[in-house]
Amino acid sequence: MAALLEVRDLRAGFDTDAGYIEVLDGVSFELASGETLGLVGESGCGKSVSALSIMNLLPQPAGKITAGSIGFQNRDLIALPREEMHDVRGNRISMIFQEPMTALNPVHRVGNQIIEAVKLHEPGLTTAIARRRALEMLERVGISAPDQRLKEYPHQLSGGMRQRVMIAMALTMQPDLLIADEPTTALDVTIQAQILDLLREMQRESGMAILFITHDLGVIAELCDRVTVMYAGCVVEQASVTQLFSTPRHPYTQGLLRSIPRLDATPKQPLTTIPGVVPALIDMPEGCRFRNRCLNAEDDCELRSPDLIHGAGRQIACHHPVAEVLA
Amino acid sequence: MKESLLQVRGLKKYFPVRGGVFLRRIGNVQAVEDVSFSVERGKTLGLVGESGCGKSTVGQTILKLHNPTAGEIFYEGRDIAAMNRAELKAFRRNVQIIFQDPFESLNARHTVSRILEEPFVIHEIGTAAERRSWAGDLLNRVGLQADALDRFPHEFSGGQRQRIGIARAIALKPKLVVCDEAVSALDVSIQSQVINLLMDLQREMNLALIFIAHDLAVVKHVSDDIAVMYLGKIVEQADAQEIYAFPRHPYTKALLSAIPIPDPSRRGERIILSGDVPSPIHPPNGCRFHTRCPHAEDQCRTVEPTEELVNEGHRVTCHFWNELAKRNSVG
């Protein structure tokens, strides 16, 4: 199946007072129509920068894409003129963020914000029709008394409700791809369960693809078809969700999976840890970026950074992957 | 019966809501409503619940950062509200807190050595040279190098900063440490390091911990006993293993089933609660959970349930826990 989104060797970074800092060091992944891809990794690994690059929303003027391509529906988004990108954003690709309070305008009523978005993308619509569209969407995302909510301001809604409003806005355009950047991280678990359920349902109805960014491996296991694991600006492993969780091959993936406390684990036993900390962006080690914390590291890891190797339905960037045994 | 290290009885904490022309008190946030529990020496009590359930307020009230609206807190058998100056000073040495955000809980303008020496200075312990050497020991104890002493908090990562926060909390060899979401802001690979450190310290120092968190898997891993809070009340408390294996309260069940499990073969079959947590300014009548409870009946809307004993050490506040348990075993 042809990929809907194909990110190839993407390099991006920021100009800072200390000079140019590269955040993405050749990131590649792809996503098919209707598929949910999880992008997982710890803070600073470049998950959000990858998403913002796809949307061409890197903070300006500091943010830069220096190499690579982002293929979407047979177009390279990086080379796309401003006007055409504007059309892709919203109509074809929508994005929801972690904190809906900062994504919604606090001084405008929720209704006006949705209506504005609808009209922006379909300029011919009258306000009355756009309003009806907004109402329908709010109902679909499970907001009770949507008539009332349209008149309210963002601060009058709870966190879960605001995230539903964001999802409603993102879905009014019926996008082919939804990028969800930690959409449930700020929510309580019972509300998170509601939102994940809602996303699944919306996907079933519309067939859109979802790029789901999170640091929570539990959420990945719950929602995604395939997973891309990132570490320090690189993709280290890519596999189907079952493969990744049953037989992680990259030492980092394995370490991550082992360090989560599990409900069925013996309590009070020391947890497995990954020693050390993520290297700073301005001080990346030569060769494999994980080698300082890796138990499998050998001399060659220092000499040459591993390429993402394809094989058996998965991809790994490691000179010494762990044997394929149950985690 | 042996005396608990800390005993909380009927604790209430209301915060005023002000409004109108003269900012009069127009209502109360009923943050904590009639909460009772005890903490034993060297043991961990996990306090779980969603945002706004009052778990942090409980922790802060134990430290006397708030005065309770009603209820009593006994530390080693003494009511902390009735303590004299000397007793209070000893109490403050023995009870410490670690906060969630290691970026905000350390003074950015102080060096690490000043941060770690301050507890000794306040309690007038040791000479300047001794304090400095103790500060170095503390850093080693939490896995940092002593050369970090002359650096500032911003030079450290989140995990390292949390280690400094822990070093400060254990400086005076306390008997009880309240960990208020102490590992929630950390990445998983760092989180597991800090959890291990806390468990090591607990063993070595016979520390009691009150572990406040919303991550139930983490809480289960570190706790001996667990109390589940909802809208200011404890709805269920029991031994950690028991509560996960045999949750009785519908809220505990929903909370446990909502945790995403890192295993794709165990997807779905969630109990999904509808709606949001109601406002603690106007909590629902009757059982506070009835607006979201899948089993609520008329009685739940009007009559507030009382705490009932399931078995020794397992208490639940629900009208129908017994009936639900029977229904489940039949079905």
Image (cartoon, grey):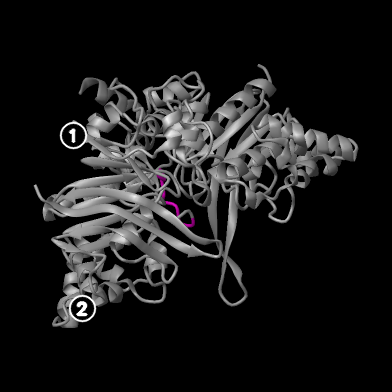
Does B284 appear in magenta?
A: yes
Q: Is residue B101 above or below residue B73?
A: below
Q: Please state the horizontal and vertical placement of residue A117, each as a whole percent of the image.
A: 25, 74
**On-image quarter of the C terminus of chain A:** top left
Residue type at mark 1 is Gly
Determine if residue B69 is in view.
yes
Place residue A294 in its image quadrant. Answer: top left
Mark 2 secondary-structure assignment: helix
Q: For mark 1, name the chain.
A: A
Of labels 2 and 1, the one closer to you: 1
Q: How many marks?
A: 2
State left or right for residue B55 relative to residue B303.
right
Range drawn in magenta: B281-289
Q: Say the numbered circle drawn on residue A297.
A: none
Q: Please state the horizontal and vertical placement of residue A27, each as a whole percent of the image.
A: 32, 49
Residue under the image location 26 percent in, 75 percent down: A82
State left or right for residue B45 relative to residue A101.
right
Alpha carbons under labels 2 and 1: distance apart: 43 Å
Mark 1 — residue? A313
Residue under the image location 23 percent in, 31 percent down: A242
Residue type at mark 2 is Lys
- How dense is the environment of label 1, judged by Cα within 10 Å: few (below 14), some, or many (20 and up)? few
Mark 2 — residue? A119
